Amino acid sequence: MNERIGGGSLRTFSAIRFRKTIFTRLVVTYVLVILPIILLGFYLYQWSYENASQDISRATNMQLSHYFDELEREVEWMGLQQFDILEDEILNKLAVTWSSMDPPEQRERLNYVAQRLTSFKNSSAYIKDIYVHIRTMNKTVSASNAVTAFDSERFSRFDAASIRREHRLIRWGDTLHLSAAKFSGRRGELPLFIVQIELDPERLRSSLQQVHLYPESGSFLMSERSGFVLSSDPDSATIIQSYLSERKSYRELTALLDMDGVLYQVDQVYSEPLEMTIATYLPEETVRLPLSKFYNWAWIFAIASLMAIILISYSTYKFIHKPLFLLVQGFKRMEGGALNIPIKHEQQDEFGYLYHRFNHMLKKLQSLIDQDFKQKMMMQRAELKQLQSQINPHFLYNSFFILNSLAKTGDVERIEEFTDMLGEYFRFITRNGEDHVPLAEEVRHSRMYTEIQKLRFSRRITVQFDELPESMHRIRVPRLIIQPIIENAYEHSLEKMLDEGRLRVTFEEAADAVCVIIENNGEPISEEALEDLRYRLHHPSESYEMTGIMNIHRRLILTYGEASGLQLSRSELGGLKVVIRIGWEEARDVSSVDRG
């Protein structure tokens, strides 16, 4: 029985949720301590990256703004020089009076213009060439080629640009130009001449490279209005195309550009005077590069922390959870009644001491329980002996009186039947072999007692004795728990009745117990008398005479526990109703012990 209950306790213990164990709570504590530190490390990394990115963006934007400031000053200076040339008195006189000049004067004036253009070109590194297209002379003068035939194509292009007042920097082909025209003042007449400044794209490309903060950087100069784009790297066409396609979504000076899975940090500055944008791009990996060691150490720290959690969790499991689990198992087995299974161990630590004391406690409990059990068994046997010794002399006298009556009538067959019943009756109540018998035997003995009483009161007392259900036949019960109650009903109620007496014995099965119900229609019992009987049943230690009913109730409690015993109430028939209640589980345990 102990092993069976112990197994049930272990199953109950295994049903405890794992999340409620100390081990789980300790592991969660470790994680809650380490995880914020790991998250703080990654936060610091991300914060450092964002700050580095912002610092790079600020430095780049300052560099780009400085670049545009310089370029704007150069363009502004070119514009002033261009206007100065446009208003040059010798050039204007040459354009107006060319046909009236003699050849020496023409050459002298042309040389002057060419020298001035050359001087202008040499004053700025951004100028590739300067042209003056003089329509009235049908000639073009440039700083690089001196005097050439009139370039009507350029004249037409930049004349149209002047008329339309295009952007200050005019795109023609892959180059940028500045243009200014000198008009005669007559309405609808073409300009006398046009001054065209061609900017040097290579010098612009070289200047773009000066804004790079990193070798991996790239930059480009663009004008959305004219569609001009100049890149510092000839191989950056794909990046520029992606930038142009997504630029509408950029509202900030700094943005990220995803190019075939590679992120680029793009910084851009716009110049309103030039109506141009300069942008630089830098791979995000380059921004993170200074933090790569920090990033690697952050991962090493995270992995080391996780390994520490695993190691601490394993140590906690091995040195705390597992020994504690064994101790809890031992207590669960002990609660279930398994006192013969000590904890086997070889530990010399605090848990070893607890295991040793626990095993010692088990031995002590086993000894005390064995002693108490033996005392209870001796008490039960003594009470059974007492009950057996209480053979009712009145019943014995009446039995001999019946025999005498039968002998006078010469009814030998009934005498034989009656003496057999008396023999079985006295054999059952006086035998000492077993303390517990199957309920079927106890019921058969009680039924035999009622059959004996029928010979006395066949006309005065009616007995209804139901059949015992098959499922209750093998339940082991203490001997003499039904017949004494029936005898008590005859002696104190039914024999004294003038009217017809009724005795009823029935059986009931519930989910947690089986019941034997004995009731009669004898003299009605008062509520005070009923309460007195109940009080005596539940307080056997007080100085009351040990009656048969109290004896039976005591033995039932000793055998099955406090949930079993006798229950007294008023019967529907009018007399006393006694219910013998036996718990199912307790009855099975008693049966298994008896079989063992």
Image: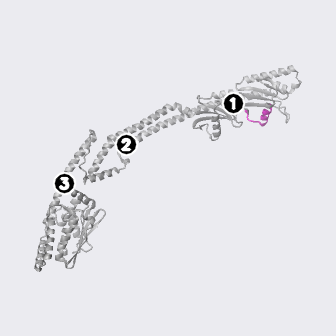
Q: Which amino acid does the dot numbered 1 rest on? A: Glu
Viewer-nearest of discs 3 and 2? 3
Q: CA distance from mark 1 to mark 3?
A: 110 Å
Q: Which residue is mark 1?
A: 72
The x, y position of residue 287, in whole percent, is 55, 32
Name the residue at 65% across, 38% down. Answer: 244
Mark found first going from the N terminus, 1 or 3:
1
Q: Earlier in the sequence, mark 3 or mark 2?
A: 2
Out of 223 and 582, give the one closest to the viewer: 582
Task: Give left or right: position of 84 versus 479.
Answer: right
Mark 1 vs 3: CB contact within 8 A: no
The magenta segment is 155-170
Residue plotted at (59% across, 28% down): 215
Q: Element under label 1?
A: helix
Q: Quadrant of the N terminus?
A: bottom left
Secondary structure at numbered mark 2: helix
Give the vertical position of 335 relative to 418 (above or below).
above
Q: Which residue is mark 3?
A: 372
Classify 10 Å Cα crowding around label 1: few (below 14), some (14-19), many (20 and above): some
Amino acid at dot 2: Leu
The image shows residue 399 at horizontal and vertical percentages of 13, 73
| Pointers 1 and 2 in contact (C-beta within 8 Å) | no
Eyeballing the image, is 503 above or below 155?
Answer: below
Find out whether residue 389 is within the magenta segment: no
Res. 340 in view: yes
Q: Which residue does the image show at 21% across and 70% down from the upper left?
A: 529
Cα distance in 3D space between marks 1 and 2: 68 Å
Q: Amino acid at mark 3?
A: Asp
Up the image or down, 530 lies above or below 150; here it is: below
Q: Which residue is mark 2?
A: 26
Q: Earlier in the sequence, mark 1 or mark 2?
A: 2
Structural distance between the alpha carbons of marks 3 and 2: 43 Å
